[in-house]
Each structure stands twice: as C-alpha cells, then as structure tokens.
Image (spheres, rainbow, N blue to C red):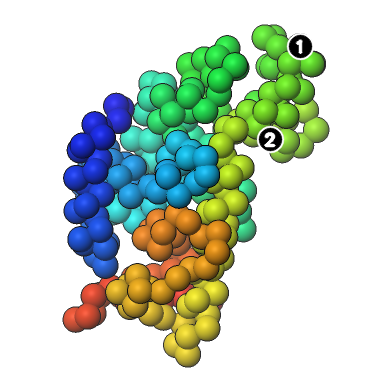
C-alpha cells in the first residue's frame, strides 16, 4: 500500500484530533492503517522516526480479527509492509511498517531489506539461511545496526534500526496507561478523562495510540456510556 500525501495525512490528523475522545471503527483494514499513520507522532522522536504501528490497534479498529490477519499477511506477502516482532510483556503483538519506511530506515543495507521484504518474510531468520547471502562478519554488522535482534543462538528476529527507540516509547506508554487505571478506585476512566491526563515522561506516542493497542490485545475493555467510552482494566 502507498502512503497518502502529506496534505491528506494532515487532514486526517486534524479530524483525529477533533474526534480524539471517540474510538473509530473501520470495515477496511487499509482505512484503519491510514488512520493510524495519521496519528503517529513521528516528530515527537528526536530525531524523527518512520511510523511503526501495532497489530492490536487494528484489532480495535476493525471488528474482524481473521480479516485483519488475512489482509496483513497479504500485504506482507506482496512486499507492501514488513511485520516485526514486538517483545513486550503488556502486549504480545506485532509491529507494522510500510515497506518504503522499512527500507528507508536502513541506509547501507539495501541487500538485506530486499531479502526480508521479497524473499524471507517470516518474523525470524536462522543462521543457515543468512549464510547463503551474508558472511559471519556481515551478520554481526546486521545485528549491531539493529537489523536483527537475537531470539536464541543462531536465530534472530527481523528488526529495524529505528525499532529500539520506538519500542522504548511504546513500553513506557503501555505501562503508564495501565498504572494510571490501576490507581483508580474502580480501575476505569472515561476516554475523555484519559485524554486530559499526562502519561508521563517518555510516553510520546499519545494516549490514543496506547488505548487502541491495549483494547486490541485484551488488557483493557471499552464500555459504551452516555459520556463516551469507559476504558476499564480487564480483571481476571
């Protein structure tokens, strides 16, 4: 899929801000992806990073997980996106990057990006597969650059140089939102109240990013009320 124009993204971002206390619902996975790209705060990172989305967010926005998984797999298999494993105890989910953003996050490793976008599309890759194309020294360089992260001996997760900074902000915000709700007597807050509060230092992705991720992963539930969505910590 192609990124929308800057003006289109800006317009969607403005709409998202105006409706910031509403959780939208989409039939199309592509529409959900465009919405999420529109609210990703790339410039909050110093230096700015390419957008990374989370699969659980799309589960929240599109009420059909089977359809979401099938469409994401189709986009991955046609080289339009790259799925990336996110290792975080609050959300065992997958990160999503547009192929053009994934490629742009590597400056001097074009051969690697070509292989993992068009040939090796699994979430992880083993040493014997890598050795068909890269030397041991080159594999070490890929690890040092952030293109690969160790899963077990001789097995790596396919990653991205910018994923480390994203994951740090993601984990911080995920935990901060849970902590905020746990401090409440009934472990719940209206979405409009969450919007007014600060998640704290380092949580730069914005409250909606984390609410969508938690709802999709099942750690939080949304209850419709006359005052808007009530976000509640899932108990048990």
Q: Which mark is residue 11?
A: none
Q: Can residue 55 be seen in this snapshot?
A: no
Q: Residue at x 71, y 12 (%)?
A: 134
Q: Is residue 34 left or right of residue 148?
A: left
Task: Find numbered disc 2 in the image and state the secondary structure of the residue it sits on.
Answer: strand
- Up-down: is 131 above or below 4? above
Pointer 1: what residue? 135
Location of residue 77 in the rendering, given as x and y in whole percent from the top left corner = 42, 23
Location of residue 27 in the rendering, given as x and y in whole percent from the top left corner = 21, 47
Location of residue 209 in the rendering, given as x and y in whole percent from the top left corner = 40, 56
Quadrant position of the N terminus in the picture: top left
- Up-down: is 209 above or below 127? below
Q: Can residue 176 be seen in this snapshot?
A: yes
Q: Residue at x 48, y 28 (%)?
A: 102
Q: Is residue 175 left or right of residue 130?
A: left
Name the image quarter holding residue 52: top left
Location of residue 140 in the rendering, given as x and y in whole percent from the top left corner = 77, 23
Q: Residue at x 34, y 77 (%)?
A: 193
Pointer 2: what residue? 149
Cα–Cα span, label 1 and label 2: 17 Å
Name the image quarter holding residue 148: top right
Task: Find numbered disc 1 in the image and state the secondary structure of the residue it sits on.
Answer: loop
Q: Residue at x 45, y 49 (%)?
A: 44
């Amino acid at each position: 899929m192609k990124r929308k124009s800057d003006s289109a993204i800006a317009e969607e971002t403005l709409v998202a801000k105006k409706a910031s206390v509403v959780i939208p619902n989409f039939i199309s996975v592509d529409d959900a992806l465009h919405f999420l790209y529109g609210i990703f705060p790339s410039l909050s990172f110093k230096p700015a990073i390419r957008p990374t989305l989370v699969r659980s967010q799309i589960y929240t926005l599109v009420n059909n997980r089977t359809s979401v998984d099938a469409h994401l797999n189709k986009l991955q298999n046609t080289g339009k996106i790259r799925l990336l494993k996110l290792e975080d105890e609050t959300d065992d989910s997958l990160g999503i990057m547009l192929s053009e953003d994934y490629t742009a996050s590597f400056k001097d490793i074009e051969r690697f990006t070509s292989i993992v976008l068009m040939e090796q599309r699994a979430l992880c890759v083993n040493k014997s597969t890598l050795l068909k194309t890269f030397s041991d020294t080159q594999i070490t360089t890929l690890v040092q650059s952030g293109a690969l992260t160790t899963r077990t001996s001789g097995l790596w997760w396919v990653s991205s140089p910018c994923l480390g900074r994203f994951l740090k902000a993601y984990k911080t915000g995920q935990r901060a939102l849970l902590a905020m709700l746990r401090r409440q007597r009934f472990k719940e807050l209206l979405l409009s109240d969450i919007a007014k509060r600060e998640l704290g230092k380092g949580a730069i992705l914005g409250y909606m990013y984390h609410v969508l991720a938690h709802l999709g992963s099942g750690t939080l539930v949304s209850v419709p009320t006359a005052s808007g969505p009530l976000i509640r910590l899932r108990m048990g």
